[in-house]
Amino acid sequence: MNKIASIRKDWKLIETLIEENRSILDIGCGDGMLMEQLEKNLNAKTYGIEINRDLASKAIARGFNVIQGNAEIDLSQYSNHSFDYVILSQTLQAMMKPKEILSELLRIGSRAIVSFPNFGHWKIRFQLLISGRMPVTEGLPYTWYDTPNIHFFTIKDFLKLCNDMNIVIEKSIGLSSRGRQFDINDSLTGVNFFTHEAIFLLSYKNYEPIKIKSSKKIFSKNSVIAS
Amino acid sequence: MSDTNIIIKNDPKLECDIALIENANFNLESGEVLKNLKIAFKTFGQLNNKKTNAILVCHALTGDQYVSGTNPLTGREGWWSKMVGPNKPVDTNKFYVICSNVIGGCSGSTGPKEINDKNSEIYGGDFPSITIKDMVNAQSLLVDKLNIKKLFSVIGGSMGAMQALQWAIDYPEKISNVIHIAGALKHSAQNIAFHEVGRQAIMNDPVWKNGKYFESNERPERGLSVARMIAHITYLSEDAMHRKFGRKLQSRDIISFGFDADFQVESYLRYQGKSFVERFDANSYLYLTRAMDYFDHDDTFKKKIEFSHKPNNHIKYLIVSFTSDWLFPTTESKIIVNNLNNLARQVSFLEIETDKGHDSFLLDEPQLDSLINGFLISNFGKINE
């Protein structure tokens, strides 16, 4: 099968974080383009949630398993570790309860891939500093009164939250506004300044799935999640 | 005991095929046994060489095998002609579509208006109680007889959706996907209540005579038409009724201060009732509404899917609901979706925005058309690539 080129730079990076033959839930899957990329290139088994009716309809009509739904309500229906990976791309900042969502991602998925626009980017900092008004940039193009983004946070804020929640950051990638890519661990202060969009691969500390294989079903059980 | 013998022959009067199953000894869920079984069905399109393109369409309460083309009994278009046919969303140039009249129905399959083998009289009220599971068991016999090992899809709306779900529970090995439209895991108390009013209207018609009206060559038309009028209200929505009729008067400028059909909505319902009695048997209506009432997988569905002795992981589900459907509301569809997601099954779900109520699936809904067409074509491609 021909591999397909990804449309977005972050999708290409997301693909590099995932092994072949994995089950993946894409939250906010749109019309299924990322799912298609992951199915074709990684032979993934994909599932999606999309809040927009028309986009969900398109994705279903293209043969993907997609439910029209709202992640803040509908994640609860999935059992623990239903998926190898759960992807939340560019959406955490628009969630009512980002912390709850984050813990849900790691309940239903063994690993989570989260990407978000970094509010600590220098352009945003300078706009607020110089003009004294809420920043509007190409990454965050909305005015304050009609933005879907209701929780702004920086890479440092996100790292602190992960630490508080005992979440392990397995990999982290920063993207500059020109698409340059770097490892976030290298030099945090600098990275927080230049990262336009951040992508994190997350899991829980000490997580070890106990899998009992029978001929038909795989029983998966959580070991102790607390650190 | 002689062996089961199935023959298929064409019925020129009904313009459909009839599968005659002699010595079927067909066990019903009620415990009763039907010695012989008759299934009236129609097929559309061509079965491919590998027999992988068969789709079973399950009809709703008052439907029949005439899903597409012309219905010879009414002279009108088949009940889902806009969905099924050449170049339609369920494209019979590509798929082989089977539609059979449910047992208990009145378009040629074994039902209350057919002859009872035991005494060579019309069954009438002596017909045994039928369930959705019984209907599906009969359909499965037919599919076997047609030498189809696996249906590509089972599609149904309303009572048809109940059958589609029952297929997933009882015969997962015989299906690849399920399209479940405007259905539920159970018939709700309100739905049973509406059915009961309809049944009471029929049974209180003096012509009904405990289901033996055929002896005097009459039909309980008044009761059946009232039942249809009530049911028809539940298939619409308040918005759709308001949009269609409002308070508009029928063929008059002023109200009559009487009980004539002053309002258009009254005239419309009377017409619906009147045309229904010409094509439907009152006893069948009693039996089939009862079958829907008895449908209940509320507590058992998840367990039956999870602990099925036959693998059912491969089944892809498409669950569809309509915003204005208050008979089988979206919340009911979402219960099915939640159960399937909880078991990590392959399920898609869409709630289509429309004001046309429960009957939306039979009406012009472009989003439903493109959804079903896309779902079938893309998944057929995935299976056969």
Image (cartoon, rainbow, N blue to C red):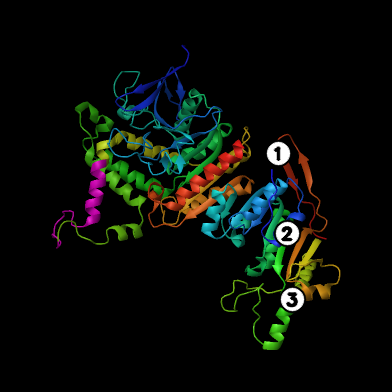
Give the numbered dot on residue A121: 3
Apparent side of residue B264 relative to residue B89 in the rendered image (left or right)? left
Residue matched to label 2: A113
Packing grade of label 1 (10 A; few <14, some 14-19, many >=20) is few
Q: Can marks 2 and 3 be said to lie on one chain?
A: yes
Image-quadrant location for residue B303: top right
How far apart marks 3 and 1 lie (CA) works out to 47 Å
Apparent side of residue A218 relative to residue B246 in the rendered image (left or right)? right
Of mark 1 and mark 2, the one earlier in the sequence is 2
Of mark 2 and mark 3, the one earlier in the sequence is 2
The part of the chain drawn in magenta is B253-275
Which residue appears at 69% of the width and 58% of the height?
Answer: A87
Q: Amino acid at mark 2?
A: Ile
Instruction: Locate residue A168, reporting x and y percent.
Output: 81, 61
Instruction: Locate residue A103, reporting x and y percent.
Output: 71, 61
Give the numbered dot on residue A217: 1
- Magenta region includes residue B5: no
- Marks 2 and 3 in Cβ contact (< 8 Å): no
Q: Amino acid at mark 1?
A: Lys
Of mark 3 and mark 1, the one earlier in the sequence is 3
